[in-house]
Image: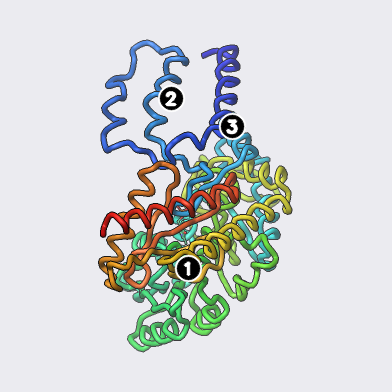
Amino acid sequence: MNAEEFKKNAHMIVDWIAEYFEQIEKYPVKSQAAPGDILKRLPRAIPIRGEKFERIFSDFEKIIMPGITHWQSPNFFAYFPANNSFASILGEMLTAALGAQCMSWATSPAAAELEESVMGLLAGLIGLPEGFCGVIEDTASTSTLCAVLSAREKHSDYSINADGFAKKAVFTAYCSREAHSSIEKAVKIAGIGKNNLRLVACDKNYAMDPQALNAAIEKDVRAGLRPLFCAAALGTTGSTAIDPIRAIGNICKKYGVWLHIDAAYAGSALILPEMRHLADGVELADSFVFNPHKWLFTNFDCSAYFVKDKGALIRTFEILPEYLKTGEKSPVNNYRDWGIQLGRRFRALKLWFVLRSFGASGLQKLVRKHIDLARYFAGAISAERGFEIMAPRPLSVVCFRYRPQAARGDDSKTDRFNELLLEKLNATGKLYMTHTRLGGKFVIRMAIGQTRTEKRHVKAAIGMIVKMAREMEMTAG
Ligand SMILES: *Cc1c(COP(=O)(O)O)cnc(C)c1O
């Protein structure tokens, strides 16, 4: 493809993207493809001679598109959103075009300095107290792993990096029963051991019970173990429960435990002054992660990791082989030393485009709208006979279920009804929701956070959910 052909194809694709967003509601939100459907239609071999782009693109439309779940659909209410925006897409295009490896300052000074600047702006936008320093990682999973590794090194005087685990104390880690699986994964990878991760009990709102945390730490101390790391959730994945950060933070301080805040989804809500109270006590944390790629209109991937002791982070990851030595005189940020990857994408660019293009008030308006829509949904669905809300709704996720009369309070029958209800709703292709279990019960999650979701989409969803539940109940008997 030469430059002329590139221009022609690129213009065509930009038009296609704009139209995709105009027509996105026409696609089934959840791909209706069955396992193997796509694979069997794909070409079996790489062509010997290069193909015309028209042909490749036509296969993209015919074969790939039917296997896409439309995460940007305004009727996407599953998991958490991974929303994007035109500003972000444009930034991503330029990142791909520049193709810079942003491992050190010297490999692209603007990338390093923009990342430093943007992370400072972002910290201000979410109201993080002074003293936190930010870096962009690919995902919250990676950010959390960086936190566990930094805690491990700081608390072992950087000796595990040097000598491995031989004759080291047994470390323990803590998170609530509702914490994200990435905590367990990080604890496993960091060599702490899954069996040394304590799953602390929650209160009736699915938030960590600090007294239970305190008891677990004390028990471990008495047993001669070394409490190392605690992850508090600012917005659990199941129900967006908010762990009491100040109480947890005070306990962590008492025992010298590294406090990491996992705000992967809910961190974006902190751009709203009226939501800052959720993060009360955040100054007690050692590290904090949230994903602009979830709820801040920045296309995947972009995870914002903030750490207080930047020195501990860098000492954990620093490497300096001869071929990476550069000769700057004044201190610069070499982000390869701030995490796991050496090569890094220029992610700061799209985030910068988003922050400038929306402006603080533009971002606040959208996030606030999502929270308002969730409040509206919760009110409307709970006013319908048989529906109940299953957890508090601090933000934009509503956990609910239907209680069919025929189940007569039998939870397993109610579970089965809701599983089927969810399946049937998703099969319509008109909306997409997912589920979780809370207190053992199957609940449907309505997560509202798509860039283009309006009240009419939420209203339509309520209509469909209620109608489907009534129909199912009638036919069942
Ligand atoms: C989504 C989520 C994660 C994982 O995010 P990735 O960026 O996909 O690794 C971690 N913690 C919580 C609370 C989440 O909601």
Q: Mark 3 points at which residue?
A: 93
Q: Which of 358 and 331 is in front in this view?
A: 358
**Three-letter amino acid code at the position of disc 3:** Met
Picture layout, residue 382 above or below residue 79? below
Q: Which of 107 and 100 is in front in this view?
A: 100
Precedes in sequence: disc 3 or disc 1: 3
Query: Does residue 329 appear to the left or right of 263 in the view shown?
Result: right
- The label on residue 61 is 2
* Residue 368 place in picture, x, y as percent: 65, 58
* Residue 119 place in picture, x, y as percent: 65, 53
* Residue 320 place in picture, x, y as percent: 51, 49
Q: Dot 1: what SS?
A: helix
Q: How far is the residue under mark 1 from the one under mark 2?
A: 47 Å
- The answer to whether the residue bearing label 1 lies less than 8 angstroms from the nearest atom of ligand 1 is no
Residue at (60, 12) in percent of width and height = 4
Query: Does residue 304 appear to the left or right of 208 in the view shown?
Result: right
Q: Name the residue under label 1.
A: 151
Picture layout, residue 74 above or below residue 385? above
Q: Which of 188 and 409 is in front in this view?
A: 409
Precedes in sequence: disc 1 or disc 2: 2
* Residue 376 place in picture, x, y as percent: 58, 61
